[in-house]
Image (cartoon, rainbow, N blue to C red):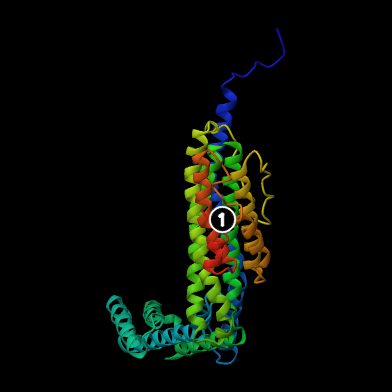
Amino acid sequence: MSDEPAARPAGDMPRRAGAAARAALRSLPRRIRLRQGISRVRVAFWPIVQAALAAGVAYGIAVVVLGHTQPFFAAVAAWVCLGFSFDRELRKVAEVAAGVALGVGLGDLMVHLIGSGWWQIALVMAVSALLARFVDRGPLVTIQAGVQAGVVVGLPASVATNGAFGRWTDALVGGGVALLVALLTPGDPRRRIRDLAQSATRELALTLESVALGLRDGDADELAAALVRGRAAEKSLEEWHDVATKSDEIARVSVNRVLRAEITRLTGQAVLVDRAMRSVRVLARRAPATLRSLGKLGEEGSHRVTAAPLSGGLPPPPEVDPTADPVADLVVRLAHGVRLLAAALGSGTGLGQARDALLDVARDVDPRTVGEGHWQVQSLVLLLRSPVVDLLEAAGLPPEEARDALPEM
């Protein structure tokens, strides 16, 4: 009897490869969400530490200076006012502080006048919210006034151990500490926007490289992974645009107005990179049909989907033969320019290097020379022209010059 293992059936390996590819494709959105979650934690780390320290300081001041035994609302007010981001506009911090103080003060007063219960909570929350709307138009004041008044009335009477308005003075201390922290540590909104811009633009570069791999290898799974990656990046692009727009509005009236030029530029770049990503997703959807018409598309599940690392630097770009795969070569070169753009956006430095790399790509995006005689290939080249123009504008080129950089049709 032979000791050699039995040979596996010929069809077993493709099935195993297909299962592995499908598993990698299913796990791709999870890996992207994990990487985005790590990025959010990194951005929010120091604001959260500051807010936690401010809560502790407010609690300590209420104990040592005011002599309160359980100044719970001092810590709560400081934490609620500061939040967990560097986007601390002084007016909004003041609105939250006013809402907390109003709610806690009115709640304390009503508890001593009418006691606590279900109808007292309803009454106090309604009165606090209406009074807050009268005092200020900001929604934060109204929300915090109602919430804090309801909390005060709902707590057991034994908690109020510091006099009739002890909890109100605790809230004033917490709000005061929060305002002091906001004054002494003015946030630079550009830091967060730069981080978001770099992360989202890197996703575009990775999506382009995944498309290039799919074109080079005739890999339907890789092209599907590129489409999944592009769709998963929508949240990053939306967050970049939302934060930049909000910061731009704040910079008009705050001490950060001297930074508004860069913030406005980053807002416009968010729109352009988002448009480029949408065009690249169209390219990823069209590519399989083109490869199939040329007889270059492999069977689904016959390749291994490439996975980008969850943290750290970007993976090395794919190697492509420009003679054998001219369209894949254009996509790789475009991804290289996007990598440079991401680095420039993240550091706030000049865009010249990225612009030069993208201009070099733009000069070669000519369907008359790339894929000559194959209209399917030429259609892919045509699809590349739109994201190239958007990215040139994102790299600082005026719209007319960006369009003129392409070969004439």
* Towards the viewer: 274 or 56: 274
Badge 1, how many Cα within 10 Å: few under 14, some, many 20+?
some
From the viewer's side, name the closer residue of 65 and 7: 7
Image spot of residue 389 (x, y percent): 54, 60
Q: Is residue 48 left or right of residue 249?
A: right
Q: Residue at x 66, y 62 (%)?
A: 356
- Write the residue at 33% across / 87% down: 110
Q: Position of residue 194 (x, y in %)?
A: 60, 69
**Residue 192: x %, y % from top left:** 58, 71
Name which residue type carries label 1: Pro
Image position of 132 (left or right of 389)? left
Nearer to us in this view, 19 or 287: 287
Q: Which residue is mark 1?
A: 407
Does residue 63 lie above or below 23 as drawn? below
What is the quadrant of residue 361 in the picture?
bottom right
Q: Is residue 321 visible?
A: yes
403 up-or-down from 306: above or below = below
Q: Nearer the viewer, residue 82 or 156?
A: 82
- Furthest residue in direction top, as rendered: 1
Task: Please determine whether, in this image, residue 379 is positioned above or below residue 253.
Answer: above
Using the image, determine if residue 405 lies above or below residue 15: below
Query: In terms of secondary structure, where does tag 1 sit?
Result: loop
Residue 77 visible in this rendered orientation of the protein: no
Q: Is residue 203 left or right of residue 147?
A: right
- Quarter of the N terminus within the rendering: top right
Residue 183, percent from left and from top: 58, 87
Q: How many marks?
A: 1
Residue at the (49%, 45%) spot, across then down: 379
